[in-house]
Amino acid sequence: MQAGVDGPTGMPSGTEALFRAALGPPAARIYLPFFARFEERGRSGLVWSPRAALGNLAWLVYWRLWDAVLVQSILTVAGAGALGWLWARADGVPMGVRFGMAVAVVVLWLAVPGLWGVAWLHGGLRQRTVAAVEEADTFKVALEHLERSVYAWRPRGYLFSAATALAVVLLVGWTAQLLRGAAVSDEPASAALFRPTPPPSISPVATPTPAPEQTAASPAVDKLVPVIESPAAEPAAGRVLPDPDLSGVRPRVRGFGVNVGLFSVAANAERAKARLSEAGLPVLDDPVESARGPLTRVRVGPFDRREDAEAAAQKVRALGLEARVYEP
């Protein structure tokens, strides 16, 4: 860097002119005060930049900080993959822990460029200004080269930044879809969701109407026709009443039990049933219709005593699953 009289920011005038040319007038007003502080200390440091935090990858692409773009891209993909696995595969992790880890990933994703972005920008522009001075014959030519580079890149920088922002939005949308799809299958047990299913009502079987009695006004007949007063007790000869169709009726489970969870994904329900069976617990499952579509309810039981149900609930919690004891 060229030494000289201190400029308005306190940096040597030559250094300030080079940074101003590399930043462009609008950005120079924002970042030159930070650069002056770094130059005074002889090293870059952490400062909070809302533009770098919210702009994130798009901001890094605009300033051509390719090493930082690589680091942040790896963090973005790793964070989205971790959230996808956490919500789609980790059945035993409680919902509160999942939300906490999701918030932690988002905060980290914003904090990394927000805290280090200005330092990365200072280091990247310092390398460009040094290279411009070394390649140019005069200091004026170096300034002109930096200014041309800024204006030539600006249209492409806007385009590449917009494409990067769109890719991040699509990735966030895909992750959010995973969260919404898995939230139903892993929500904690509650009394409203897991109370025992009431037995469905059975419609009475239609019976034949008995023949009406002969009255005085009826025409004469050769013999009397017997009338069956109680068709339920004495059906017509040779007539067999059909059995009621009970194929869609689920008998109510008697006794104490443990509600484990409602699952919208059949594979998750099967994994939970397999873990419970491997632990030696009696497993019950039945389909449940809801406004969000068909669900599978998984329970453990039944037990004659509440103490047995409480002991089974402790085994279920030890497996990392939710457990709520219900009464008959």
Image (spheres, rainbow, N blue to C red):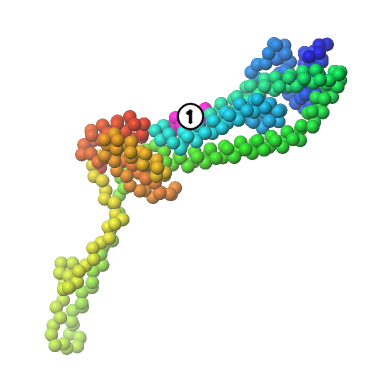
**Residue 289 is inside the magenta segment:** no
Find numbered disc 1 in the image and state the secondary structure of the residue it sits on: helix
Give the main secondary structure of the magenta stretch: helix
Question: Which image quadrant: the C terminus?
Answer: top left
The residue at 44%/31% (across/down) is 96
- Residue 277: % across, % down: 29, 38
- Answer above or below: position of 191 versus 125: below
- Residue 104: % across, % down: 52, 27
Question: Which image quadrant: the N terminus?
Answer: top right
- Examine the image and state in which quarter residue 33 appears: top right
The residue at 27%/36% (across/down) is 281
- Examine the image and state in which quarter residue 194 appears: top left
- Examine the image and state in which quarter residue 249 appears: bottom left
Is residue 6 visible in the rendered image? The answer is: no
Residue in the foreground of this view, choosing between 142 and 101: 142
The residue at 64%/39% (across/down) is 166
The residue at 43%/34% (across/down) is 90
Q: Judge from the rendering whether residue 116 lies leftward or rightward of residue 192; answer left or right.
A: right
Q: Judge from the rendering whether residue 319 lies leftward or rightward of residue 129; answer left or right.
A: left
Is residue 255 visible in the rendered image? The answer is: yes
Q: What span is colored magenta in the figure?
A: 94-104
- Residue 102: % across, % down: 50, 31
Residue assigned mark 1: 100
Residue in the foreground of this view, choosing between 111 and 154: 154
Exactly how many numbered labels are in the figure? 1
Q: Judge from the rendering whether residue 66 lies leftward or rightward of residue 225; answer left or right.
A: right
The crowd level at tag 1 (other Cα within 10 Å; few <14, some 14-19, many 20+) is: few
- Residue 197: % across, % down: 31, 47
Q: Amino acid at mark 1?
A: Gly
- Answer above or below: position of 285 versus 1: below
**Residue 102 is inside the magenta segment:** yes
